[in-house]
């Protein structure tokens, strides 16, 4: 709420209606705070920041730049959002950071603003969980219901679709896409796109079958899973050139929404997609424990 006047309550905090700002925090007069916002101790909120209804900054949080947060987010200590990117080409352009609603962003997460070369926006959707020490670089676009485990790191210009899970200590290469309901195992290095609905893992990641647990949790029908398994076999285990494999999927399988999304993702890949490891034929899938 720009230009607001706050008063000191009996608890020692400054408040205006449902807005609560701890006296040790610094909130620029140009920042916009919605009802129900709670800003705990030692936070810094910049001039161009907008914070939605019910969002809480626990303590020691820094919000900078042209940053917008939706409703009912919880931001834990030592997190920074909207700071300048770690990109030598960045020249101070007024790029944005847009955070949706219902997100939980744990300790020491860093989310950097966009750049001129990447669309000027870093975007995080709704109901995501970013565990401690995660990094989201400039111009990333993260969907909704994504989980990033501790110390998962995204380079610039990465897209993560809805419902994907990124294991802890993983590193994702710039411009890579992670498909819907895909899972990346912990400590993985991901240099190429991870198709939707699959499991990828490894120091230089390979595909190890479908993410069956993720499909089950998201109520994908048994019939659809069976068709996805057939599509996976054709696309990633026959050894066919990808254009031929895609043509075979089109000619032999019904284009259910899941199959259509999988094929569209593969066809639109610019970096190329991960494949199954040759030495095992991609047949063995590691245990999925989450």
Image: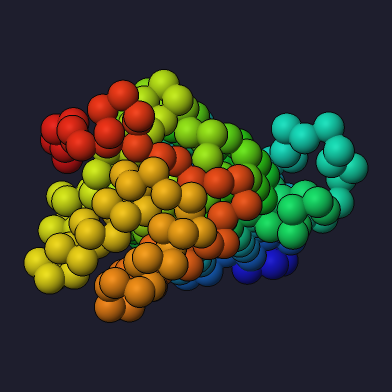
Residue found at the very far right of the displayed protein: 91
Quadrant location, the C terminus: top left
Along the viewing direction, whichever of 114 and 216 lies nearer the viewer: 216
Above or below, 94 relative to 284: below
User: Which residue is found at the position 74% from the left and 53% from the top?
Assistant: 118
The image quadrant that residue 148 belongs to is top left
Above or below, 191 relative to 183: above
> Is residue 11 visible to us here?
no
Along the viewing direction, whichever of 168 and 268 lies nearer the viewer: 268
Along the viewing direction, whichever of 47 and 198 lies nearer the viewer: 198
User: Which residue is found at the position 26% from the left and 27% from the top?
Assistant: 280
Horizontal side, residue 286 vs residue 118: left or right:
left
Residue found at the very far left of the displayed protein: 222
Q: Whole-percent x and y of residue 175? A: 62, 45
Q: Whole-percent x and y of residue 151? A: 43, 27
User: Which residue is found at the position 56% from the left and 55% from the top?
Assistant: 269
Horizontal side, residue 257 vs residue 15: left or right:
left
Q: How many marks?
A: 0
User: Which residue is found at the position 41% from the left and 21% from the top?
Assistant: 203
Colour mapping used in the image: rainbow
> Is residue 30 visible to us here?
yes
Quadrant location, the N terminus: bottom right
The image quadrant that residue 119 belongs to is bottom right
Above or below, 153 relative to 10: above
Horizontal side, residue 256 vs residue 154: left or right:
left
Along the viewing direction, whichever of 11 and 176 lies nearer the viewer: 176
Q: Whole-percent x and y of residue 236? A: 36, 47
């Amino acid at each position: 709420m720009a230009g607001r006047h706050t008063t000191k309550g009996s608890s020692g905090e400054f408040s205006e209606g449902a807005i609560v700002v701890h006296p040790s925090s610094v909130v620029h007069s140009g920042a916009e705070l919605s009802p129900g916002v709670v800003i705990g101790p030692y936070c810094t909120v910049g001039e161009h920041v907008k914070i939605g209804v019910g969002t809480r900054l626990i303590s020691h949080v820094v919000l900078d730049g042209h940053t917008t947060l939706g409703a009912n987010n919880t931001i834990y200590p030592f997190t920074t959002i909207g700071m300048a990117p770690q990109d030598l080409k960045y020249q101070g352009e007024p790029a944005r950071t847009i955070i949706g609603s219902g997100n939980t962003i744990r300790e020491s997460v860093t989310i950097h603003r966009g750049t001129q070369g990447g669309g000027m926006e870093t975007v995080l959707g709704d109901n995501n969980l970013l565990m401690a020490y995660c990094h989201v670089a400039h111009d990333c676009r993260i969907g909704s219901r994504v989980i990033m485990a501790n110390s998962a790191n995204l380079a610039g210009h990465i897209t993560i679709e809805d419902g994907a899970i990124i294991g802890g200590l993983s590193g994702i290469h710039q411009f890579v896409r992670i498909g819907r309901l895909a899972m990346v195992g912990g400590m993985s290095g991901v240099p190429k796109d991870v198709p939707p609905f699959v499991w990828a893992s490894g120091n230089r990641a390979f595909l190890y079958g479908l993410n069956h647990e993720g499909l089950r949790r998201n109520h994908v029908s048994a019939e659809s899973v069976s068709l996805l398994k057939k599509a996976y076999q054709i696309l990633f285990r026959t050894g066919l050139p990808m254009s031929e494999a895609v043509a075979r999927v089109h000619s032999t399988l019904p284009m259910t929404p899941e199959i259509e999304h999988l094929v569209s993702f593969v066809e639109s890949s610019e970096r190329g997609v991960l494949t199954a490891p040759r030495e095992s034929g991609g047949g063995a899938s590691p245990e999925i424990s989450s």
